[in-house]
Amino acid sequence: MNIILFTKYIGSPMTLRMGHSKFYIISMSFIVLTCSGLFYAGYWLGQANTLGDTDFGSNSSKISQVSKQRKQLANLERTTQTYLIRLSTHLGLLKAHIIRLNAFGERMTKMAKLDANEFNFKSVPAQGGLYRPLAGTTVKSQDFFAEMHRLSAVLKDREAKLSALESMLLHANIQRAGTPEGKPVRRGWTSSSFGGRRDPFTGRRTFHDGIDFAAPIGTPIYTVAAGVVTASGRRGGYGNTVEVSHGNGLVSRYAHNSRLLVKVGDRVRKGQKIALMGSTGRSTGSHVHYEILKNGKPISPHLFMVKKKSKK
């Protein structure tokens, strides 16, 4: 088989002579190379398309994740705002309670006649320190934290003042309740006073340690102050006697009773009925012998029977 080649470098055409077998081999080699080139080109294009599809899928997944995170942030923001609104409401209620506490404290201070400067419920507690804002907090959250800190300081201050006020009032109430005041009877008349007198049995000049109040047998006898019963029973010339300790060395004594209504160890309040009037012991008739002792020595009950006038 003859193959004629034309080229611009050779003026006349060239003629190649080959057999059929050589021509077949060359033809097949050309076909194989051509197919290989086409296969490689197709493979490369396929890979390029595959990579393009992969990048697009990756970007789509990232976009989906970002969208999901945005939704989560939006939900978190709504939840945070809800909590902030609730917190604001609670702070408002707390402020209202503090206002009521201030009013109560001022009223109690006036009632107890205490120094208003010492128990000032209008002033804000003194505070100080360097300004060091917390990192990572928004302006709104800082405002809430600052307000909560301020209210916490106010509450601590009010708690301390009210606790001190309560302690003082309690002590004053205990002293007042434990201080003898008034008479042991609500009806009757004074048959014998404190001090020197003539003895009803001998007629001699003697000293009377208390005050006698006369009334019918069975007339109620009341304690003149709160305290603890330290004696209840028969006691020589005093007859049926009740003694009540009021603290600070003060003891009240009620003698010549017909019946005793309390026993040793009983706690009694001011004005409580403790006995019934009689004429037991060294007595000439129905009456109650009322004594006040200070550290074991009798003092005039008149000192506690006259109520002190309050200063206006």
Image: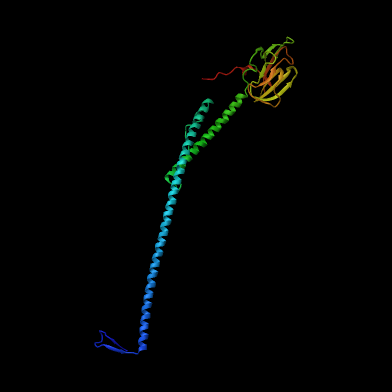
Outermost top residue: 203
Q: Is residue 190 above or below residue 79?
A: above
Coordinates of residue 47 in the picture (x, y in percent): 40, 69
Q: Residue at x 43, y 54 (%)?
A: 68
Can residue 208 be seen from the camera position used here? no
Classify residue 45 as left or right of residue 300: left
Asked where in the image residue 2 lies, by quadrant, the reply is bottom left
Q: Nearer the viewer, residue 179 or 216?
A: 216
Asked where in the image residue 273 lies, by quadrant, the reply is top right
Q: Is residue 40 above or below residue 301?
A: below
Q: Residue at x 59, y 28 (%)?
A: 171
Outermost left residue: 11
Q: How is the image coloured?
A: rainbow
Coordinates of residue 144 in the picture (x, y in percent): 45, 42
Coordinates of residue 41 in the picture (x, y in percent): 37, 73
Coordinates of residue 22 in the picture (x, y in percent): 36, 88
Q: Residue at x 29, y 89 (%)?
A: 15
Q: Residue at x 51, y 26 (%)?
A: 110
Can residue 155 be seen from the camera position used here? yes
Asked where in the image residue 46 lies, by quadrant, the reply is bottom left
**Is the N terminus in the top left, top right, bottom left or bottom right quadrant?**
bottom left
**How many numbered marks have been drawn onto this rendered protein structure?**
0
Q: Nearer the viewer, residue 272 or 31?
A: 31
Classify residue 35 as left or right of residue 106: left
Q: Nearer the viewer, residue 63 or 98?
A: 63
